[in-house]
Amino acid sequence: MNKPELIKYVESLGETKQFPEFKAGDTITVDYTIKEGNKTRIQSFTGVVLQVRGTGATKTFTIRKISGNVGVERIFPFASPNIESITVNKRGVVRRARIFYLRNLRGKKARIKEARYESSK
């Protein structure tokens, strides 16, 4: 392989899927593939984005949900081949890029105000 072909090959390895834009405070659903033995299935994880961190191939995002009265957080890398799709369910309005204070809140205090968008006519 000569240099231009090698560069194109390496760049193709770094390509990631295109996902919608989201930020901290948004409620999203991540569909990801789980391998159990020789079977694979798609599982959904719906929760609030706590943070988006990193750049390029090391970019990750953290999602938190309450499952059975227990807080569950999961960190997903953007470059993961196991992520099938990301759906933005609700846009939230928060004033910070990392909303770790949400960990200490329960019930109605843990609500995030929804962003309101004007329709253009």
Image (tube, rainbow, N blue to C red):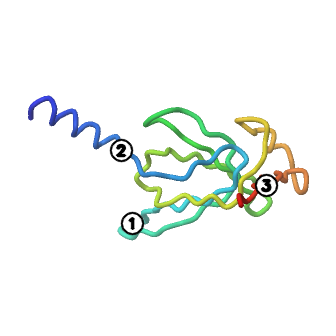
Q: Around disc 3, counting alpha carbons within 10 Å, would you say few (fewer than 14), some (14 to 19), or many (20 or more)? A: few
The amino acid sitting under disc 3 is Arg
* Residue 69 image position (x, y, % from top left): 80, 60
Q: Amino acid at mark 2?
A: Glu
Quarter holding the N terminus is top left
**Residue hosting label 3:** 116
**Is 45 in front, or is 19?**
19
Q: CA distance from mark 1 to mark 2?
A: 28 Å
**Residue at image mark 2:** 15
From the viewer's perspective, is residue 86 above or below residue 74? below
Q: Is residue 61 left or right of residue 120?
A: left
Q: Residue at x 58, y 48 (%)?
A: 21
> If the image is split into quadrants, where does the C terminus sit?
bottom right
Circle 3 SS class: loop
Q: Amino acid at mark 1?
A: Gly
Q: Position of residue 109 (x, y in %)?
A: 90, 51
Say what secondary structure mark 1 lies in. Answer: loop
Q: Residue at x 46, y 62 (%)?
A: 33
Identify the residue at the far left of this view. 1
Judge left or right: residue 21 versus residue 81.
right
Give the Cα separation between the discs numbered 1 and 3. 45 Å
Residue at position x 9%, y 31% from top? 2
Q: Nearer the viewer, residue 74 or 46?
A: 46
Relative to 105, residue 97 above or below: above
